[in-house]
Amino acid sequence: MLKIENLLVKIGQITVEVSDLLVRRGEYMVLLGPSGVGKTLLLYSIVGIVRPVRGKILLDGKDITYEKPEKRNIALVPQNFALFPHMSIYDNIAYGLRVRGVPENVIREKVLEISRMLRIEHVLDRKPSQISAGEAQRAALARALIVRPSVLLLDEPLANLDPETKMRAIELLKLIHRSANLVTLHVTHDICEALLLADKIAYMYEGKVVFVGEPDEFLRTSFARPYVRLLASIDNIINLRERVESR
Amino acid sequence: MSRAADRFLKVEKFLIILSAISSFAIIAILIPFFALFLCCRYDVVCKILGTQLLRNEFLNALKNSLLAATVATAILVFVSIPLGYVLARVDFRGKTVVESLVDLPLVVPHPIVGVMLLVAFGSRGIIPLGIEDTFWGIVSAMMFVAFPLAVDAVKLGFLSVDPMLEYVARSLGASSFRTFLTISLPLCYRNILAGAILAFARALSEVGSLLVLAPYPETVTVLIIKWFDTFGLPYAVAVSSLYLLLALALFLALRALVKVGAYA
């Protein structure tokens, strides 16, 4: 369980204030909001890259607010996937286990197992510059998941994918989340991603979490108006296409 | 002729002018090199290498230059890695002052560097280490003048590494030191090597401060001035040609090493 209490994070002009946020184990929370409201900054303070001004971050009851990032067991998949460019995909995925001193034969077994699951075993020998965006996303997920983190933080992980790869990635994220029983926090500004993935949506506006609830509830709030308009226009386009095709 | 084609031609003309100016600059730089090798007399080179006294003096000077430049570069690499990393990654009060201090040796005239080092670390200096006329005097002068080149190259290298790579490594369980060793350092080793090559080349070419601080033991650059005064231009040209050939060969070999390393 990830709990945030009375948190204030500040970097330059961007301020994030979260009075109370709770993500239960097994829950997939999507942090939704327009660009520049501080969603990523909140993620960075959870992973330990940014020090909060005040407040508490609790993981399974333990205060980790000022804990070093390497002690938190919180894995981050950033928007650009940040695969280590000088290492092969195999070494990228193995990195977290090598750091923990796991024997090389066990590492090999685990890397092959997760690569098979994420269908990237054919790129293990390649460098990150030699694989597609979809494969890079799966490699970054594999690298994060292999260390069995308590929390998985995803910073716009689907932003650079084409629609087909994106749909496959959404199915994969659902599967991973269910099988690993994680606390997952997924940052996006895309309502479709949020509706397809979220158990709960936390909506951020002007640096504050102003709504937390189920997707259906969110769509009934005033914050959802621009998104509902967007969904309605997409729906109109689909209806129009269907009418044209049926003629 | 279409407007787009017309514009293309204008751009082409512009490029031709730029190329002409660039060629002129490159030729102007190459002329002294050609002149040096052209004016180098074979009989004088043979005399230097054939006469035991002159040969020993030259080889001793060469040994001093190469050894001192290598030691100075090694120390500079060791120092510039932590300093370059801190300057690239940490924001602190007075950072601009520190950055200006790092670049300060670039603007100090070299004889003044010699005087400064003499009054700082000479036998009668404020920290009396007695470095004048010693091997370590040469190393200190070389380090002082090459310091900004090494630090700036390493700093640029660390700046080019995406900090997100380090954050992800930390989130995967790596300590800050392990992250530095396995992510940051390997990703900027080319800049470190480039900085080392620049520092080495700068150290080899130092003379102004050495004339004040440590004219003995002789380095090749000091020897060139001495032979120019004692034996005249032909000897200075001959020893300069030999030294330059060696320095260029070393420089090219190190550059090739960096390139080969990049594809390893």
Image (cartoon, coloured by chain):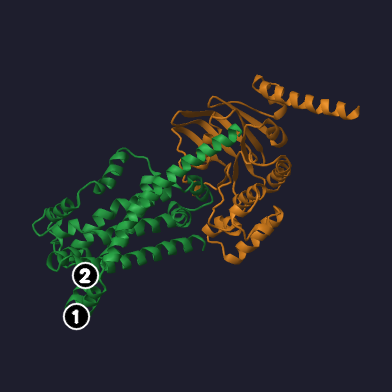
Chain colours: A orange, B green
> Which of pointers 2 and 1 lies earlier in the amino acid sequence?
1
Residue drawn at (19%, 49%), measured in percent from left and top? B109
Residue placed most toward the observer, B143 or B126: B143
Image position of B203 (left or right of A192): left
Q: Chain of mark 2?
A: B
Image position of A128 (left or right of B120): right
What x and y, as percent, mark residue A179?
Answer: 70, 48
What x and y, as percent, mark residue A184?
Answer: 63, 41
Q: Are marks 2 and 1 on the same chain?
A: yes
- Quadrant of the rendered structure where residue A181 is? top right
Q: Can I make out residue B259 in this image?
A: yes
Q: Chain of mark 1?
A: B
**Residue neighbourhood size for the residue with mark 1, other residues' Cα within 10 Å, grouped as few (<14), some (14–19), many (≥20):** few
Residue drawn at (19%, 52%), measured in percent from left and top? B110
Give the residue at mark 1. Answer: B52
In the displayed orientation, state which residue is furthest to the left.
B124
SS type, badge 1: helix
Q: Can I make out residue A147 in this image?
A: no
The total of numbered circles placed on residues is 2
Classify the position of the N terminus of chain B by image quarter.
top right
Residue drawn at (24%, 75%), measured in percent from left and top? B43
- Quadrant of the rendered structure where residue B223 is? bottom left
What x and y, as percent, mark residue B61?
Answer: 21, 70
Give the residue at mark 2. Answer: B61
